[in-house]
Amino acid sequence: MKGSFQIIRLFNIPVQIHWTFLLIFVWLGFTSYSQSWNWQATTWAFFFLIAIFVCVVLHEFGHALTARRYGVDTRDIILSPIGGVARLDRLPEKPAQEFMVAIAGPLVNIAIGLILSAYALVASEESRMQLFDIFSLLTDQGSNFFAVELSAFEYFLFGLIALNIILAIFNMLPAFPMDGGRVLRSLLSMKLGRVKATRIATIIGQLIAVGLVGYGFFTMSLVTSFIGIFVFVSAANEYRMVRFDRILEQYSVQDVFRPNYSPLYTNDTIEKALQQLSSGLEKHFLVLNEWQQMTGVLSEKQLLKAAEEKTATTPISAIINTSYKVYLPSDPLKDVFSDSQWTISPVYDQGCLVGVLDRQAVQNFLKIQQRVKK
Ligand SMILES: [Zn+2]
């Protein structure tokens, strides 16, 4: 992601930090200065921030390593001030697998919370009492959390336990993009299919989002309202993406390719190609030789770049791209779209060139299909 830099590589997955994450440390420095903390307090707060960051990374590795068990790779894990995200190459198709991948993250936080709690239980009498206080806080708002005198280490320990509980609960909210939204969708998918399940999960998520905005408004909590708006938009996006995937699945190259096209020829000049570009609607071209055989392809971008660098009389054989993909009418549209470098391809049927498939046409087709109500 733009503005991110790698800090470590674990299990062959790069962990990256978005530069805005560093603002948290600026904020810490500022708070420490304005509230005149001593250096011990500042150091503990610094390590607490690092510990939060480690817990979030472990949460993301919960997703990434579970996904790996199902053969799904993770491009990277990115941390920003609003949280972490493990960018999986794709989502597992089977609902049961999606369920496992989604729930693995919060389970990591529960595990961390339990391990730290076990330590607190055996560490000392006071820490045991304090531990009970944390759990009573979850059921009773009036608890005297942190009312007793604690050492800096105990603050750190109980802060982390509380943090992991909060991370687990917050992430299990049944709303996209939280893990709970995916857990809910995967459970619904088992009975209803992916599109319908996503639709229902989206509606539930948006109701929760409206609730969050309302709650934030009444309690004057800007952060809560902001999270609500974020959740609302994310839910809508998720549904659009799933519908988009479904459209891709329904069609093949057959539905999108153009049998009529104007080719360029290898001995055409750049000038001739530019004329064809500006006089017609086509932006990318198949290039044939004098025996009408496919030789290469030329995209608008390539042509314009060559026009800047080379003389107008240069034959386009010098600038065409001779490695290109070939599609059959029966190829699924999904395969075409997953290739981001692709701009234009010849379509062959039983060994004969029958037409052309270009990115622009595919995008237009999908744009139209997304608006068609089904
Ligand atoms: Zn998660």
Image (spheres, rainbow, N blue to C red):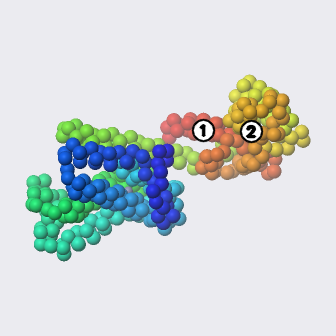
Furthest-bottom residue in view? Answer: 122
Residue 341: x, y in percent? Answer: 64, 46
Mark 1, secondary structure of its residue? helix
Task: Report x, y in % for residue 198.
Answer: 42, 49
- Marking on residue 363: 1
Of residues 177 and 15, the one drawn nearer to the viewer in this rendering:
15
Up/down of 109 relative to 39, above or below? below
Q: Reading the chain from its start, which is encountered first: label 2 or label 1?
A: 2
User: Label 2 vs label 1: CA separation?
Assistant: 18 Å
Direction right: furthest residue: 291
Query: Of the numbered discs in the image, which one, if any, rests on residue 193?
Result: none
Location of mark 2 (residue)? 298
| Residue 320 vertical placement versus 172 (above, below) | above
Tell me what residue is drawn at x 70 percent, y 41 percent. Answer: 344
Determine the quadrant in which ligand 1 lies: bottom left
Name the residue at 27% across, 70% down.
115
Residue situated furthest top in the rendering: 279
Label 2: element kind: strand
Asked if labels 1 and 2 touch by Cβ distance under 8 angstroms, the answer is: no
Residue 285 visible in this rendered orientation of the protein: yes
Q: Judge: label 2 CB < 8 Å from ligand 1.
A: no
Tell me what residue is drawn at x 23 percent, y 72 percent.
119
Towards the viewer: 158 or 215: 158
Q: Amino acid at mark 2?
A: Leu
Q: Is residue 60 left or right of residue 221?
A: right
Asked whether residue 197 is in view, the answer is: no
In front of the other: 113 or 276: 113
Sort mark 2 into few (<14), some (14-19) or many (20+) by Cα contacts within 10 Å.
many
Q: Looking at numbered disc 1 in the image, what kind of residue is underneath it?
A: Gln
Give residue 310's position: percent from left, percent from top. Answer: 77, 33
Tell me the crowding category of disc 1: few under 14, some 14 to 19, or many 20 or more residues within 10 angstroms, Cα based.
few
Q: Is residue 343 left or right of residue 136?
A: right
